[in-house]
Image (cartoon, rainbow, N blue to C red):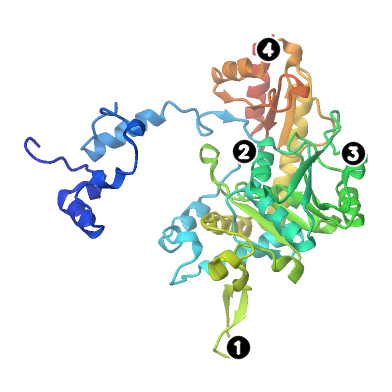
Amino acid sequence: MSGKQFVHPYIPNSEPAVKRQMLDAVGMKSVEDIYEAIPEHLRFQGKMDMPEPIISEYSCQRHVEGLLKKNRNAKNNICFLGGGTWNHYVPSVVDTIMERDEFLTCYVGEAYTDHGKFQALFESSSMLADLTGFEACNTPTYDWANAIAIAARMASRANGRKELLVAGNMDPDRLLVVRNYCKPEIKVETIAYDKATGLMDLEDLKSKISDKTSCVYFENPIYIGALEIHAAEICRIAKDAGAYSMVGADPTSLGVMEAPAAYGADFAVGDLQPLGMHMSYGGGLGGFICTKDDKEFLGEYPSLLFGVCKTQQEGEYGFGEVYYERTSYASREKGKDFIGTTTALHGIGAAVYMALMGPQGFRELGEGILQRVAYSKEELKKIPGVTIPVSGYSYCDFMVDFSGTGMTVKEINKALLEYDIIGGKDMSEVFPEYGQSALYSVTEVHTKEDLQALFDALKEICA
């Protein structure tokens, strides 16, 4: 390409004629005019140390695949990571439907030509509502943390109160998002929990709840690996104080656990990832919010809701947006809250997964996970120096304490990689009261042979 201006093979706008056309359209002589407002001392001087572009598409593909081989993944390793993104089996038909052009390529699931997206999202919301025991469910938010924060703001608008109480045993990363999203209007306070059981301290809840409390949030299953057996009592305490209650739930657990609405909750939130989404380096997320079908709640949703509506053809029904004027799409700055891009595609994928599973499938899934987790906890306790610090039953996630081995979680996880095993999430910094503990996740993908491989490896490592 000697003597010619270089055109980057993967940046179409680098073609000189196209670049000139774009600059002419905005009345600029060069690209430099775009950056003239940036002072010289803030600009990078020199050439960035970057490799030249690989012209051959085949060579580029091989190069990227070579880089990706450096990663350890859940396909060629036995993976026990969880705590928010879980290693569940994804039926191939879920990927097939999600990759259909009319679903995959349309922004937010809202397109000028519908091609069935409204119905797909209506079905998804309906099945999530069935699982949680409610009637209304929104289009997906970014993730679980975002769903908590949005629902907290919904609750505050509904009852006019400005305080959110959250269980101290919740995911710390979710809590950071909630604190940030609720600023400055809503004060966020944590409730203590019992270290031995992982359960919320009801006396601390009673001492902190007041006529200022808008909502009480807790997770069931609990993030640190227990089941909140006081869920109904927490909801009752909140109601007696005139506050709402919000439950963060793993939707796959609701085939064997009571639905949040059945024990008195006002909101159910969680993530779609367990419902047919690949782990994707911690991605594949999409939050949901479920409530009763009352204007008290519907009027405060900032996100889109899809429902069945009449059409101009008598006797014919379609799928359309519910109470659209409350959204920022319709009312801009007068909307209930501001929303933007959603994870609607994951909502469609979740619909496929839930339809495939059905009630019996969810029950069998939940029972299988409970059995595997109980078995794993009993076997791990037999390894010298290893204990299970949180008592009671667990679903998917449970804590394993390695303090008695004299090794750190970091050291153990590094050693496990030599056995092609990805160990649990290191909890020693975020929950230091549990010492050198890791959060392990066991799901339906783990066979007895997988679990035995973990037990055998830990016996050798901890010896």
Please state if 176 lies on the left or on the right of 13 as rendered: right
Residue 276 in view, yes or no: yes
Marks 4 & 2, CB-CB < 8 Å contact: no
Q: Nearer the viewer, residue 5 or 398?
A: 5
Q: Position of residue 285 (x, y in %)?
A: 57, 47
Work out whether mark 4 precedes mark 3 in sequence or the reverse, and give the earlier one: 3
The residue at which mark 3 appears reads as 204
CA gap between label 3 and label 1 equals 55 Å
Between tags 4 and 2, which lies in front?
A: 4
Between tags 3 and 1, which lies in front?
A: 3
Query: Residue 338, located in which quarter of the rendered image?
Result: bottom right
CA gap between label 1 and label 2 equals 46 Å
Please state if 412 lies on the left or on the right of 158 as rendered: left
Q: Nearer the viewer, residue 170 or 59?
A: 170
Residue 113: numbered disc: none
Work out whether mark 3 precedes mark 1 in sequence or the reverse, and give the earlier one: 3
Q: Secondary structure at mark 2?
A: loop
Q: Mark 3 packing: few (<14 Cα in 10 Å), some, or many (20+)?
A: few
Work out whether mark 2 precedes mark 3 in sequence or the reverse, and give the earlier one: 3
Name the amino acid type tagged 3: Asp
The residue at which mark 2 appears reads as 445
Name the amino acid type tagged 4: Met
Q: Secondary structure at mark 4?
A: loop
- Vertical arrangement, residue 308 with respect to residue 430, above or below: below
Q: Position of residue 60 (x, y in %)?
A: 28, 35
Work out whether mark 4 precedes mark 2 in sequence or the reverse, and give the earlier one: 4
Residue 407: numbered disc: 4
Q: Mark 2 packing: few (<14 Cα in 10 Å), some, or many (20+)?
A: some
Work out whether mark 1 precedes mark 2 in sequence or the reverse, and give the earlier one: 1
- Vertical arrangement, residue 46 with respect to residue 301, above or below: above
